[in-house]
Amino acid sequence: MLFVQPIGYRISPDGSRIPLYYGEIKINEYNQYHVIPRTRPSER
């Protein structure tokens, strides 16, 4: 999923922050969900 605003950041070894605009949604057996920030869309 592509978000308009960053949903998280990855910190580089040099200390700079890389904004994360993509997210993967995980749903469990109780229909609860959470979004995991990603650097790019899935290749599936």
Image (cartoon, rainbow, N blue to C red):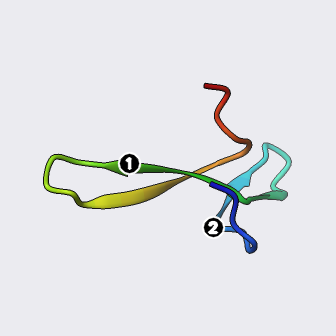
Give the residue at mark 2. 7
Helix, strand or loop at mark 1? strand
Q: Residue at x 38, y 48 (%)?
A: 26
* Residue reaching furthest to the top: 44
Q: Which is nearer the eye, 41 or 9?
A: 41
Label located before the other in sequence (2 or 1): 2
Q: Secondary structure at mark 2?
A: loop
Tell me the kind of residue under disc 1.
Lys
CB of mark 2 within 8 Å of CB of mark 1? no
- Looking at the image, which is closer to me, 39 or 24? 24
Local crowd size for mark 1, using a 10 Å CA cut-off: few (<14), some (14–19), many (≥20): few
Distance from the alpha carbon under mark 2 to that under mark 1: 15 Å
- At which x and y percent is residue 44? 61, 25
Q: Which residue is mark 1?
A: 26
- Residue 12, position as x, y percentages in the image: 78, 47
Q: Nearer the viewer, residue 1 or 36?
A: 1
Q: Amino acid at mark 2?
A: Ile
Residue at 69 percent across and 58 percent down: it is: 2
Numbered tag placed on residue 10 in the rendering:
none
Residue 7, picture quadrant: bottom right
Instruction: Spot the residue most to the left.
Output: 30
Is residue 36 rendered to the left or right of residue 44? left
